[in-house]
Amino acid sequence: MDVSIVVPLFNEDESLPELCTWIDRVVNTNNLSYEIILVDDGSTDDSWNVIEQLAASDNHIKGIKFQRNYGKSAALNEGFKAAKGDVVITMDADLQDSPDEIPELRRMITEDHYDMVSGWKKKRYDNTLTKNIPSKIYNAAARKSSGIYLHDFNCGLKAYKKKVVKSIEVYGEMHRYIPVLAKWAGFKKIGEKVVEHRARKYGTTKFGWERFVNGFLDLATITFVSKFGKRPMHFFGLYGTLFFLVGFCMIFYLVIAKFVSADFSLTNRPSFYIALATMVIGMQLFLAGFLAELISRNSSERNVYLIEKKIGV
């Protein structure tokens, strides 16, 4: 199969028929064998009924339905598991991503030999104050910390080699950092393409200000995990040892001062309690390192979702 198009969705029943018709027209014009995997992330509208109708009339369309809303990362992860195409393309279901981009994205993977290509919505139709400005700040921070120089980490329109999506695990809210996960998994050739951004035609946006707060928290998480995920003791042990040694040296100094001067009061000095607190913090960090090592070596699968129904997968 040439291409798998994975579409995570939540309450997008109005846009699905038009999106699938558009995708079908583009891939058939380019003579591509394909599948469309629609992942319903616990929609409360008529989305699943629409998916069932579309799948009944077109065997290229497959559906996965979650029992409840797990988030975009969970939907993408299940879509990646089901994908069979040599190139996997993701896009949002709200028609703000153009299926006309599919042939060129696939060509960049197959002919230019990129491991993945991320879309860049250079010209946007979103509200500048509430979306564009925070997005620019977030993307600048992501570029600085990850070393991957993309303009739009959170663009839903991306293309991947099949082996990339089969080698990464997308969990929590880490869909924003799939390029980082891919780089962490050893895929170095990550490209970017300017893509068309369209004004929303149906429904309302599912994102608010909280996504930017969560985005920065997830950035801190992925940065930490990428550096210390397999060796957490190198982080906790280092700082735990430093804290403990600082506290121990302070206590040692105070004890010597007590022996030198009989009038020296040990427990009436704030430095004594600061030293004790520093030693305790150091010991706690050290123990946290041991626990993290045990967890990292015995962790089971993180992605366990209650899938209610599937079609063709």
Image (cartoon, rainbow, N blue to C red):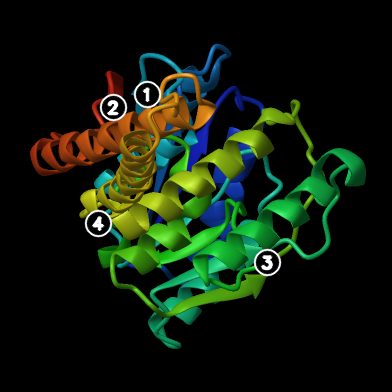
Give the label, 3 or 1, closer to the camera.
Answer: 3
Quadrant housing residue 161: bottom left
Q: Secondary structure at mark 2?
A: strand
Q: Are marks 4 and 2 in contact (CB under 8 Å)?
A: no
Where 97 falls versus 215 (above or below)? below
Q: Give the number of the mark in front: 4 or 1.
A: 4
Q: Is residue 137 above or below residue 18?
A: below
What residue does disc 4 label? 166
- Which dot, 4 or 2, sits closer to the camera? 4
Q: Secondary structure at mark 1?
A: strand
The numbered dot on residue 151 is 3
Please tell me whether mark 2 or mark 3 is closer to you in this view: 3
Residue depicted at 37% across the width and 21% down the height:
66
Q: Are marks 3 and 1 in contact (CB under 8 Å)?
A: no
Tell me the CA gap for discs 4 and 2.
20 Å
| Pointer 2 residue | 310
Residue 50 x %, y %: 51, 24
Q: Secondary structure at mark 4?
A: loop
Callouts 4 and 1 close, C-beta under 8 Å = no
State the residue lying farthest toward the bottom: 112
Q: Which label lies toward us, 3 or 4? A: 3
Q: Amino acid at mark 4?
A: Lys
- Mark 1 lies on residue: 65
Farthest left residue in view: 298
Point out residue 177 in the picture as x, y percentages from the top left corner.
49, 53
Q: Earlier in the sequence, mark 3 or mark 1?
A: 1
Q: Residue at x 24, y 27 (%)?
A: 304
